[in-house]
Image (cartoon, grey):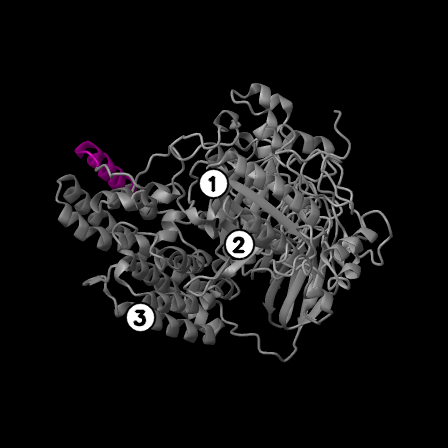
Amino acid sequence: MTEPAGTSTPAPERRGLSRRALLGIGGGLVVGAAAGAAAGAAATAPGSAPAPTTTPAARTYPFTGPHQAGITTPAQDRLYLAAFDVTTTDRDALVTMLRRWTVMAARMTQGLPAGQFAPAGGPYDAPPDDTGEAADLPPAGLTITFGFGRSLFVDGSGHDRFGLAGRLPAGLVELPHFPADDLDPARSDGDLVVQACADDPQVAVHAIRNLSRAAFGTARIRWTQLGYGRTSSTSTAQRTPRNLFGFKDGTANLKVEEAAAVEEHVWVPARAASEDAADAAWLTGGTYLVARRIRMHIETWDRTSLREQEAVVGRTKGEGAPLSGGTEFSEPDFATTGRGGEPLIAADSHVRLAHPSQNDGVRMLRRGYNFTDGNDALGRLDAGLFFLAFVVDPRTHYIPMQTRLSRQDGLMEYLVHTGSGLFAVPPGVPDGALPTGADGAPVLTTDAPFVGEALFA
Amino acid sequence: MSRTARAAVAAALALPLLAACVPNAQPGAAASSGAPGALTVSSTADACVLSSASAPSGTLTFTVTNDGSDVTEFYLLGEDGLRVVSEVENIGPGLSRDLVVQARPGTYWAACKPGMVGDGIRSEFTVTDSGQDVGPSGDTAEQLQAAEASYVAYVKDQVGALVAGTQEFADAYVAGDDERARELYAPTRVHWERIEPVAESFGDLDPLLDLREADLEDGQEWTGWHLVEKDLWQPEPAANGGEEYTPLTPEQRRAAADAIVANTRTLSEQVTDAAFTFEAFQIANGAKELLDEVATGKVTGEEEIWSHTDLWDFQANVDGARVAFEVLSDVVSAEDPELATTLDQRFRELDDLLAEQGSVEDGFTSYDELTADEVTALAAAVDALSEPLSTLTATVTGA
């Protein structure tokens, strides 16, 4: 299988660029003029001088490329995800915002301020371009990923909002009601989605905050979700993390090193567009993002015996090995039986029901996070797993499996899905396509390319 | 309803009756400490190697590692080589599992059973007298048997009342006497809710009888109590996803009522079958599961969203859990008197709180009329009881 360079290898990381390096010098010149800050930044523009530190916090990932970053990028530790409702009815205003978002994202992911001026620079009588809370922080591996919800194409009564109805891809369906769903409309759906991932939560929140600021008048936040403790590893170089049940999560996740599998199960092929009655070629090279806010009844879980915990998961709690034996990465053997001829991995265990061998071989690139949103009125933590998965087609790669899980999974006793979203994630902005200013940083122009441009072409 | 209950029961049914196995701690946690009660066992195709052939009396933790290629088991047997003191089963190749046992001084046999066949690979194991008190030495088997017999009798009694009540309810509903049906709905379901973990152990019966509308998948046919509940307490469009509720036709009524009656009869046949047993660990697990049901469904008002009769179910679940505890109380008192006292007290506190809202005989406050403070107080009392109750199974099976 041929593929564009860089598609299925871990996104190259660039070390050495930090906000401090970029802004520290300029910061001293702020009193003079805004131009001073820009000049200071230019002196240490990307690629010029090596930075003083090469800590992991200083790493950056390229914003541009055949696919958007934040998908096969090794999962960062923190998430801030926002779904937006588009408030304008003017297609041009929407395009203008997306163009602006693209440039801001291209800048922020490289450790640059969101706008042209430094957070403490610019015209003295104007509010600063950048809100400033990330000014002294390293880039922290920030990635920003954009997607489109079904409601951007057609509203609830099927009305074509922006002349995009003919481009609604077949996979961007309304998810069915799964058994035991208890979805909160205020935590579900949305016209647009922005996923910001970073190793520092403040960097991720800073990104969403600045993008939402640029959206006022065009789109407004519908719901957001903070996440911590990534619950999946997307690279074999990463240790498998644990979810709030205390079990390793994502052992069998699709890893970026499995190039052919990523190609097959994540990226929308050109074939999908040719088979689609709609004009959906704009999504070729993109993917779909399934987001599910899954609350865990952790209090009742914590009262459950280790025997039952391991039985419903189908793995050991310590090592994460399948109950059929071996170590964490041993393939589960569903045929192995124990006492009484009962399978060691129970018929309604999570690992059995979710395993590719039980789901027509489909796999997902999961990129979820733990969440704890305070507590409910009964003194219980409102905590759980914010499930994120990137898949080539939710009709084959999510809906059938979730239907089985919701109906049969022993874990469902301890889970309730409270939020849901499905988004089409367009391909990336090609390398080198974004116009840059004198300092080498991306700048906004009236015809700059933007994420999802092909949808509006 | 509880799918996990079924899984746990199914998984645990594979245990022999006399197993006195305590739920496992994190494997290796105790063994690595080098404490006198921490032992390691390596089981292979032809060897069963213990880190020591003796240990002082008290709490012993055997961390059993399957270093072979077949599924294995580990037993601690009495001096006669027959009586099973404790055991762990179903250890897959490469896995470790802890066996925690309260061992009194004496001579024992340690046995690994790779492939789960034969008498196993045995070696003598000595427990020396540490001077530590290791609890009662009396045989608890009789007490457990008495508990099981007593609980089965309770289940049969409740199912008997359920069958009679269900028929009366169904007759009223089919006859169109909605007022009478509404009166009978909650008091009849009480008998179901008291023994729900037993019904869940029969697999399909629980979803057929007790599925809530939110639990359905697209296209699935809805049967059972909550279908009729909705028809008796018909929602306004705002509470029905914005759609006008369509009442069931007389034919649909009859079909729904017949299905409930028939499935309840099936339940009755199963519990009155001579082969029906409910073992001590299942009784103890059932108590905990009943409280989980309260915590996730009843205290939040999600079980009876149309009739708001959640407090009947609440009381019934607590009743069922208390009976389960009571039939086991002799064993618990002997093994862990403090736990028995705590559970006794917390059951009383929760019952007192529920009594402020009514009773099964005289009726309860409708869930939607409870204040937020009242719900919070009830939830706190449920949590206060659930936490110690979650140790009941380990206490009973460790006796």
Q: Please check the rendered image and state whether residue B361 is part of the magenta-colored stretch, yes or no.
A: no
**Vertical placement of A210 versus A303: above or below?**
above
Q: Are marks 1 and 3 in contact (CB under 8 Å)?
A: no
Image quarter hosting the C terminus of chain A: top right
For the residues labelled 2 and 3, say whether their Cβ atoms are less than 8 Å apart: no
Q: Are marks 2 and 3 on the same chain?
A: no
Image-based side of A348 in relation to B91, left or right: left
Tell me the mark number nearer the camera, choosing from 1 and 2: 1
Give how far across and how far down residue A2 sits, in percent.
Answer: 75, 25
**Residue B143 in sight in this render:** yes
Residue A216, percent across and down? 52, 48
Amino acid type of disc 2?
Answer: Gly
Mark 3, Cα crowd under 10 Å, few <14 / some 14-19 / many 20+, is some
B260 in the magenta segment: yes
Taking the image as shown, residue A282 lies to the left or right of residue B395, namely right
Dot 1 corresponds to which residue?
Answer: A88
Instruction: Give me the chain letter of mark 1.
Output: A
Foreground residue among A312 and A56: A56
Q: Is residue A376 above or below residue B333?
A: above
Q: Nearer the viewer, residue B336 or B357?
A: B357
Which quadrant of the structure image shows residue A377?
Answer: bottom left
Residue named by callout 2: A384
Q: Give the quarter of the figure containing the N terminus of chain A.
A: top right
Q: Which residues are magenta?
A: B248-264
Which mark lies nearer to you, 2 or 3?
2
Q: Which class describes the residues within 10 Å of circle 2: few (<14), some (14-19), or many (20+)? A: many
